Image (spheres, rainbow, N blue to C red):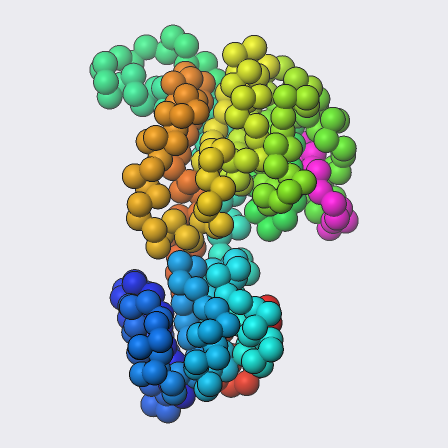
Amino acid sequence: MKILFFGEESGKYNYIKEKLGKEGYLKKNSFEFFDKELSDKNLKKLKDTEAIVLFIDKEINRRVMRDLPELKFIATMSTGYDHIDTESACDFGICVSNVPVYGANTVAEHTFGLLLNLSRKIWKGVDRVKEDNDFSLEGLRGMDLHGKTIGILGLGNIGRNVAKIAQGFGMKILALDRHPDEGMMKKYGVKYVELDYLLKNSDVVSVHLPLLKETKHFINKENIKNIKRGALLINTARGEIIETGALRWALDEGIIAGAGLDVLEGEEEIHEEIEMLSNKKRFSDWKTLIENHLLIDYDNVIVTPHMAFYSEEAERRILDTTVENVIGFLNRKTCNRVC
């Protein structure tokens, strides 16, 4: 079988090829790296391609599927798969697999990194010592997390990991989710509540909702005033879930004591984190994005450049799951199938 790696990351190609080789799958199958766009001209040279592995910045449409008559399988190295015409794939009998989870604990850990920085004013202490050689404690008094209440918006894979970590800190846990999980209630003491109750009773509000039509500006000018005065707000989900104007107003009014943000409103073109790895220009856009919001100038706001997902282990999980998907297909036991 001819397997085509379609992308621009030769390092990832080498890792996947090496893993397949160790499993003995390169003896009966050929694996090629292709870093050009798929066009009418080069598609003719790829007629015998039976499987494609691709990154999220590469698209596979109906025309490509039509012109690759032997194509039977597509593996995307991402959770999202809207860059693949799955409807056409189903029509042509082509299986499509994705990477459903790769950074649940990774993002949860970054969430607490932001929270600890805010609650204990760590970044202020570091800046003071580095910039001024000042070891005074004035203005650096923080607060304990133990005994405080964290309100988690969205108890999916990431939110559940946040709850587990929060329990380790001795925090009380409130959660808002469409599907209450009895296991989380029993094991971690999670209490499922309505939004208004969560906002009014949480010392920390942490956002882990997906960005959908109904979740855009989920935290807005109408409800942000209900947040418990002096609470901290953390967002490692999507910037559009929090209305920027409302957040700035709440900070100015002292309703929110501090915010830790790994995402900012204005990133709507980014479909998921892994896309940032394949589009280096996005990183250079961050300075402008942050300046537009003016949030970086707030003394009680920490902004990181959408890096919560970015760890060595998370990236490896993407590649390892992709290898598993390819091996599954070769053994006629397709894993993580979306079509």
**Residue farthest to the front?**
40
Quarter of the picture containing the C terminus is bottom right
Which residue does the image show at 38% across and 49% down from the upper left? 276
Q: Where is residue 74? Give x, y as percent.
A: 48, 74
Which quarter of the figure is the N terminus placed in?
Answer: bottom left
Can residue 18 be seen? Answer: no
| Magenta span contains residue 171 | yes
- Residue at the outermost bottom position: 28
Image point (49%, 42%), residue name: 268
Q: Is residue 200 visible?
A: yes
Quadrant in the rendering for residue 169: top right
Range of residues picked out in magenta: 167-183
At x 51% / y 85%, what residue is drawn?
A: 331
Q: Residue at x 53, y 39 (%)?
A: 238
Q: Does residue 297 show up magenta in the picture? A: no
Q: Which of 133 and 72 is in front in this view?
A: 72
Q: Where is residue 180 in the image (x, y as percent from the top left)?
A: 75, 46
The vertical placement of 32 against 231, above or below, is below
- Image location (x, y in percent) of residue 3: 38, 80
Residue 111, given in percent of the width and then of the height, sits at 50, 37
**In this rendering, position of residue 165 left or right of residue 53:** right
On screen, 107 above or below 14? above
Against 65, is 250 above or below? above
Write down the quadrant of residue 26 in the picture. bottom left
Camera-side residue: 307 or 293? 293
Between 239 and 108, the residue placed more toward the observer is 239
Left of 57 or right of it: where is 161?
A: right
* Horizontal side of residue 103 vs 186, given as left or right: left
Q: Quadrant of residue 221?
A: top right
